[in-house]
Image (cartoon, helix red, strand yellow):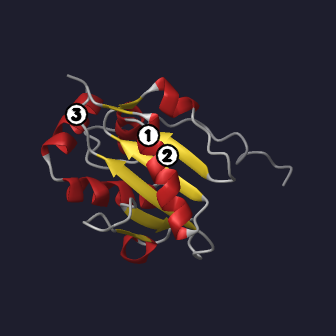
C-alpha cells in the first residue's frame, strides 16, 4: 500500500472536524495565513452556511480564502451540485475565492464547472491532497535523508 493511500485511509477513519483542521493546517504549511494560531479557522458545524473554514490569503491578511472540506469515501464522487452550493455559500459571504478539498474525486461535470461570476475555486481531490500532505510533511515523517557533498566552484572563484 502506498503512503498516499495510507494517508487517505487514516483521514477517512477520523472525524469530519479532524479533516477540517487538517485542511487548514495543510494550507498554513503551504504558506497561506501565518502561524497556525491566527492563520485560519474551521467553522464546520450546523448552520455554517456551507463554509467549513477560512484562511488568510497571506500573512498580512489582505484577503480571505474560504474552504469546503468533504471527507468522503473514495467511491463517492463530488459532483457539480456540491460545487454550485459552495459558490452560493461564497456569494453569501461576499467572497471571491474558495478551495474545495475532498478525500474522494470530482466528477467531470464538477471539474468543468466554472462559475459565471468572478469567483475562483480551486479543486483538490484525494490524490492531490495526499501528495500535498507528503510534500509538506503533514501526517508523515521522513525516515532517512542522504546528503551528498561536492565542491562549490563559485566559492573558489577569485573574481569576487
> Residue 46 placed where, x, y %?
25, 66
Residue drawn at (67%, 46%) of the image: 116
Mark 3 and mark 1 in contact (Cβ < 8 Å)?
no
Q: Secondary structure at mark 1?
A: helix
Q: Is residue 22 left or right of residue 114?
A: left
53 or 83, which lies in front?
83
Residue drawn at (30%, 68%) of the image: 47
> Residue 122 placed where, x, y %?
54, 45
Mark 3 Cα within 10 Å, few/some/many (few <14, many 20+)? some
> Residue 87 placed where, x, y %?
52, 52
Residue 36's place in the image compared with 51, above or below, is below
- Which image quarter: residue 53? bottom left
Residue drawn at (61%, 37%) of the image: 151
Mark 2 and mark 1 in contact (Cβ < 8 Å)?
yes
Q: Residue placed farthest to the right in the image?
A: 159
**Pointer 2: what residue?**
84
Q: Residue placed farthest to the left in the image?
A: 13
Which numbered disc covers residue 73? Answer: 3
Q: Secondary structure at mark 3?
A: loop
Q: Work out whether mark 1 precedes mark 3 in sequence or the reverse, and give the earlier one.
A: 3
Mark 2 Cα within 10 Å, few/some/many (few <14, many 20+)? some
Classify the position of the C terminus by image quarter.
Answer: bottom right
35 or 48, which lies in front?
48
Q: Secondary structure at mark 2?
A: helix
> Residue 52 placed where, x, y %?
36, 60
Cα–Cα span, label 1 and label 2: 5 Å
Residue drawn at (20%, 33%) of the image: 6
| Residue 31 visible, this angle | no
Q: Which label lies toward us, 3 or 2? A: 2
| Residue 131 visible, this angle | yes
**Pointer 1: what residue?**
81
Cα–Cα span, label 3 and label 2: 21 Å
Amino acid at each position: 500500500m502506498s503512503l498516499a493511500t495510507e494517508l487517505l485511509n487514516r483521514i477517512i477513519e477520523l472525524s469530519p472536524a479532524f479533516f477540517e483542521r487538517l485542511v487548514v493546517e495543510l494550507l498554513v504549511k503551504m504558506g497561506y495565513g501565518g502561524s497556525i494560531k491566527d492563520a485560519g479557522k474551521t467553522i464546520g458545524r450546523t448552520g455554517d452556511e456551507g463554509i467549513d473554514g477560512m484562511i488568510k490569503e497571506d500573512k498580512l491578511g489582505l484577503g480571505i480564502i474560504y474552504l469546503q472540506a468533504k471527507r468522503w469515501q473514495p467511491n463517492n464522487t463530488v459532483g457539480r451540485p456540491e460545487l454550485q452550493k459552495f459558490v452560493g455559500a461564497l456569494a453569501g459571504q461576499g467572497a471571491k475565492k474558495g478551495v474545495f478539498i475532498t478525500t474522494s474525486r470530482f466528477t467531470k461535470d464538477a471539474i468543468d464547472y466554472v462559475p459565471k461570476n468572478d469567483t475562483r475555486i480551486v479543486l483538490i481531490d484525494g490524490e492531490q491532497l495526499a501528495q500535498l500532505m507528503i510534500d509538506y510533511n503533514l501526517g508523515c515523517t521522513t525516515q532517512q535523508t542522504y546528503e551528498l557533498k561536492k565542491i562549490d566552484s563559485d566559492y573558489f572563484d577569485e573574481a569576487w
